[in-house]
Image (cartoon, helix red, strand yellow):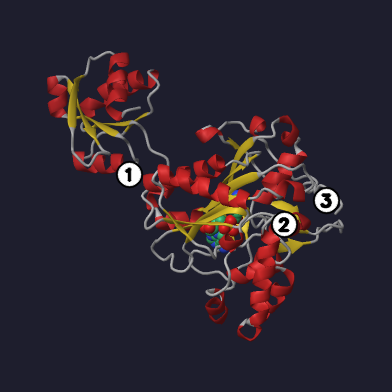
């Protein structure tokens, strides 16, 4: 087979690589990449696969006005773009190993319903240049921790191994034979899939087909020794870190670039209903070469932010407000309030001040709405005693602290930082 050619970005649509991004994000060592929303259609046809629903039915594709030969597509996903950018920018030669993340809108021409939109948002991460099970496990542990932290409801991870080019062809053939033996029970789409890409059979949603598929052979029984060892190691590492998951031996994912580890994350959420996959991902060791690059493995995931917000309202929380909001209860407290705010701001704390003249209850309501961590109350009692009362607004316990108004700024800031753990 001749070596595939490289697919460039569309003219005038550029990638912003980590070194160019104004702010570096360093969580788990991932650098942000900002990718164009428009790509050449053949990028997705080749990466995601000609016979997938995404490429066959769901892409928003068009020809540009200047009749440029290549049709263009609003990206339905971003892994293909990440790999294109990794190759086009030369990162592949400079770094080889790269950890990139992205966020932004994706477009799929699906039948819209709650949790399924034609423009939706993803955040995703890709690790290029690593073929070890540790890279897969690290991503899954990270995800599991994250879902705990944002209190996502009913999350469970489903895991499978799809084998690789040394063992999958034989499985594909077994599946094709099985399908041919049950032809009369399968839908028209599945008949076509049998010819072109039998693995897609496992992904059919038609109830009659599902019944047949229940009895189909599974990839696991055909995995080669190397794929089995990789899968066993991923699972052992997940067990070690107490990450719960379920094996789903019929999981194939809706994109063709995967091999070995594939996973999907399901959740429960108000209105999520059948659209309960909040994320998915896996390994794609053949994709870089398929897009014209050298033989570089990769693994990654993407979360659907529209659905994540339904399953984990806390994940959609806006940024925290100021560390402290100063609440003068009466006009006499205005001058001390400004003085206090200035001293704390000089120490680098984010502090807000509200105007005087409202009740404590109303002001505490404001502080909560603005998501302040602490309320600093300056009322008549506080002014008389020369002490401000500090109330912790985040812990459900109503802890109160008091400090003298003349405490020096640095000491006060240290005290507040220690209180909020900042
Ligand atoms: P995907 O499973 O096609 O994977 O999409 C990831 C997530 O995007 C889904 O689990 C879902 O939450 C969300 N999503 C997909 N379609 C829609 C839609 N129409 N409306 C709302 N949300 C949607 C990928 O896109 C791969 N690129 C993931 C990946 C990264 N694999 C390796 N690296």
In this rendering, position of residue 144 left or right of residue 385: right
Q: Secondary structure at mark 3?
A: loop
Pick the front one: 243 or 379: 243
Say above or below: 63 vs 355.
Answer: below
Image mark for residue 4? 3
Residue 105 in view, yes or no: no
| The N terminus sits in image quarter | bottom right
Q: Contact (CB < 8 A) between labels 3 and 1?
A: no
Q: Contact (CB < 8 A) between labels 2 and 1?
A: no
Number of dots carrying numbers: 3
Q: Secondary structure at mark 1?
A: helix
Residue 148 in view, yes or no: yes
Residue position marked by numbered label 2 in the rendering: 44
Give me the residue at 71% from left, 50% from top.
287
Give me the residue at 15% from left, 25% from top.
382
Q: Secondary structure at mark 2?
A: helix
**Res 59 → quadrant:** bottom right
Query: Which of the two marks, 3 or 1, is nearer to us in this view?
Result: 3
- How far across and how far down the image is residue 156, in percent? 42, 56
- How far across and how far down the image is residue 179, in percent? 65, 77
Give me the residue at 76% from left, 35% from top.
90
> Does the closest atom of ligand 1 sit within 8 Å of the Cβ of label 2?
no
Dot 1: within a 10 Å radius of its alpha carbon, few (fewer than 14), some, or many (20 or more) residues?
few
Going from N to C along the chain, the mark reached first, 3 or 2, is 3
Whole-angstrom CA distance, mark 2 to mark 1, is 44 Å
Residue position marked by numbered label 1 in the rendering: 369
- How far across and how far down the image is residue 368, in percent? 29, 42
**Res 337 → quadrant:** top left
């Amino acid at each position: 087979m001749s070596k595939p050619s490289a697919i460039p970005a569309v003219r005038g649509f550029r990638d912003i690589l980590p070194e160019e991004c104004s702010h570096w994000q360093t969580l788990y060592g991932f650098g942000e990449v900002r990718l164009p929303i428009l790509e050449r259609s053949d990028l997705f046809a080749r990466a995601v696969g000609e016979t997938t629903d995404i490429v066959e039915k769901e892409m928003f594709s068009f020809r540009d006005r200047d009749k440029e030969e290549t049709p263009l597509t609003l990206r339905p996903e971003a892994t293909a773009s990440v790999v294109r950018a990794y190759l086009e920018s030369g990162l592949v030669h400079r770094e080889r190993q790269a950890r990139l993340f992205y966020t932004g809108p994706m477009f799929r021409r699906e039948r819209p319903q709650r949790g399924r939109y034609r423009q939706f948002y993803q955040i995703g991460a890709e690790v290029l240049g690593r073929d070890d099970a540790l890279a897969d496990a690290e991503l899954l542990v990270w995800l599991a921790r994250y879902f705990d932290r944002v209190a996502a409801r009913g999350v469970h991870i489903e895991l499978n191994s799809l084998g690789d080019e040394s063992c999958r062809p034989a499985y594909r053939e077994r599946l094709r034979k099985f399908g041919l033996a049950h032809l009369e029970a399968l839908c028209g789409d599945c008949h076509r899939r049998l010819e072109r890409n039998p693995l897609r059979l496992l992904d059919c949603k038609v109830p009659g087909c599902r019944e047949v598929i229940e009895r189909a052979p599974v990839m696991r029984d055909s995995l080669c020794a190397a794929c089995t060892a990789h899968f066993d190691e991923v699972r052992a590492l997940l067990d070690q870190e107490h990450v719960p998951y379920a094996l789903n031996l019929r999981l194939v994912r809706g994109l063709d670039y995967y091999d070995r580890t594939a996973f999907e994350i399901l959740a429960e959420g108000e209105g999520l209903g059948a659209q309960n996959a909040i994320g998915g991902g896996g390994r794609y060791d053949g994709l870089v070469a398929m897009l014209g690059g050298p033989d570089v493995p990769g693994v990654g995931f993407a979360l659907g932010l529209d659905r994540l917000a339904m399953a984990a309202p806390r994940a959609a929380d806006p940024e925290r407000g100021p560390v402290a909001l100063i609440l003068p209860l009466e006009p006499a407290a205005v001058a001390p309030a400004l003085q206090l705010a200035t001293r704390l701001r000089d120490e680098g704390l984010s502090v807000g001040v509200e105007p005087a003249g409202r009740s404590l209850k109303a002001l505490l309501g404001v502080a909560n709405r603005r998501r302040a961590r602490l309320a600093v109350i300056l009322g008549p009692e506080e002014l008389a005693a020369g002490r401000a009362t500090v109330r912790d607004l985040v812990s459900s316990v109503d802890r109160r602290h008091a400090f003298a108004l003349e405490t020096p700024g640095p000491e006060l800031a240290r005290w507040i930082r220690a209180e909020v753990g900042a």
